[in-house]
Amino acid sequence: MSKSILLHYFPMRLKTFISLVLLSFFLCSGISLTADSSQDDSEEFIEDHSHADIQRGERFFKGFLPITRDFESCVSCHNIYKSDTLNWNPSAMDIAVKFAGKDFSEFQSAVMEPDGVKMEASHNDFKIEEVDLKKVKLYLDDLALTGPPPTGPTITQIMLFILLGLLMTFALLDLIFFHKIRYRVVSVLILVVALGFQVKMVATAAIDLGRSQNYEPDQPIKFSHKVHAGQNKIDCKYCHFTVENSKSAGIPPMDLCLNCHSLVREGTRSGKFEIAKVIEANEKQMPVEWIRVHSLPDHVFFSHAQHVNAGKLDCKECHGDVDQMDVIRQVEDLSMGWCLDCHRTKEVQFANNSFYESYEKLHEQIKSGKINKVTVDMIGGTDCMKCHY
């Protein structure tokens, strides 16, 4: 094959390759949209009402209708999407699930004749025609069936990865066939830099597997540690009462919540809605499906009793300032390196601690002044078998 044919053939193949890559990407991106549209079609009618009625109810909920209004829209208080800060009001999904199996009159009463100080103040100037409120109910019923709208993945890194791959492909083809770039070192540099960035992206993603630093999920009940542990000064161990004797800190049972909330039925910020979930869960004997925030891989042994009881660690040393968090967040990355750094620097409280009485040699060295402190690694805290066995 002559050089002129090669120069014609490979650019055409390169164009085809690029076109196929871009086409595949956009087709993959469109899968979720297609799925969503098919789901919408399957729910075209809710209780013999058209999809147009549901859309009109959505517009009222979001404040697009009526065009002229002198009151706040529903979405200004009730989130449809996840918020970065705690919104004490129930979300649109919360309301949808609560009233999904109930008739319109009950929903209308809750909206137009609200019960509770906070809700009365919020709905004081709220005005909507009955026919329009019925459409809002239809939208919420549909939302309860279909779930909240997807937020969609961020495609920046995907696009960057594809772009780097295309640059590498072009640089490699130019080195072998095209020779369009005058200096070969430029093509080599493009290859090395692009490959380096791709390796870094893959390595970072691989390392992050199983780690969830700054993970901050919405919980089924808006429980604020800032209110309970911070403002009300409730000791962590009152609710997490197994922390000193168990591997797990434990999840408080609903009847423990009722020690306070059998009397306290309305919060100053959350109103009655969230506390009513606690009451209902206890009455129906249904466990609340809390979302776990801090989680270690299955091959790692960790005991709260060892750290809190024997080690005398304060909760905030691992969990951060929980008493300042409305929504619980994983502060540390909980990596092995983080644990080992702590074990190499953390001083063990040997004095008046019966757990460490058997370490006679270390006690003698402290008394003689040979050492002035004992760190966790000195009692086997960096041995592999302590955590992996």
Image: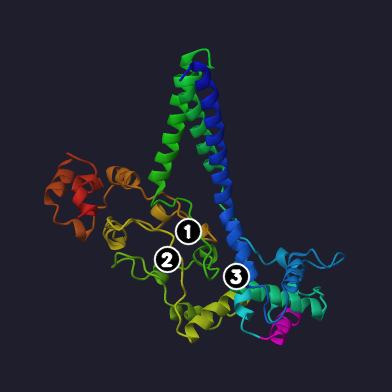
Q: Helix, strand, or loop for circle 1?
A: helix
SS at mark 2 in the image: helix
Q: Which of the 4 image quadrants contains residue 23?
A: top right
Question: Which residue has dot 3 on it?
Answer: 146
Circle 2 sits on which residue?
Answer: 236
Q: Which mark is residue 322?
A: 1
Of the image marks 3 and 1, the number of the one nearer the N terminus: 3
Residue 161 horizontal/vertical position (percent):
50, 38
Residue at 62% across, 77% down: 272
- Give amino acid for label 1: Val
Residue 65 in which image quadrant: bottom right
Give me the disc on residue 17: none
Q: Which of the two residues, 367 or 221, is positioned nearer the viewer here?
A: 221
Numbered range of the magenta stretch: 103-114
| Front in this rendered view, residue 365 or 331 | 331
**Looking at the magenta stretch, what is its main secondary structure?**
helix
Q: Amino acid at mark 3?
A: Thr
Residue 68 in the image: above or below residue 84: below
Foreground: disc 3 or disc 1: 3
* Contact? badges 2 and 1 (CB < 8 Å): yes
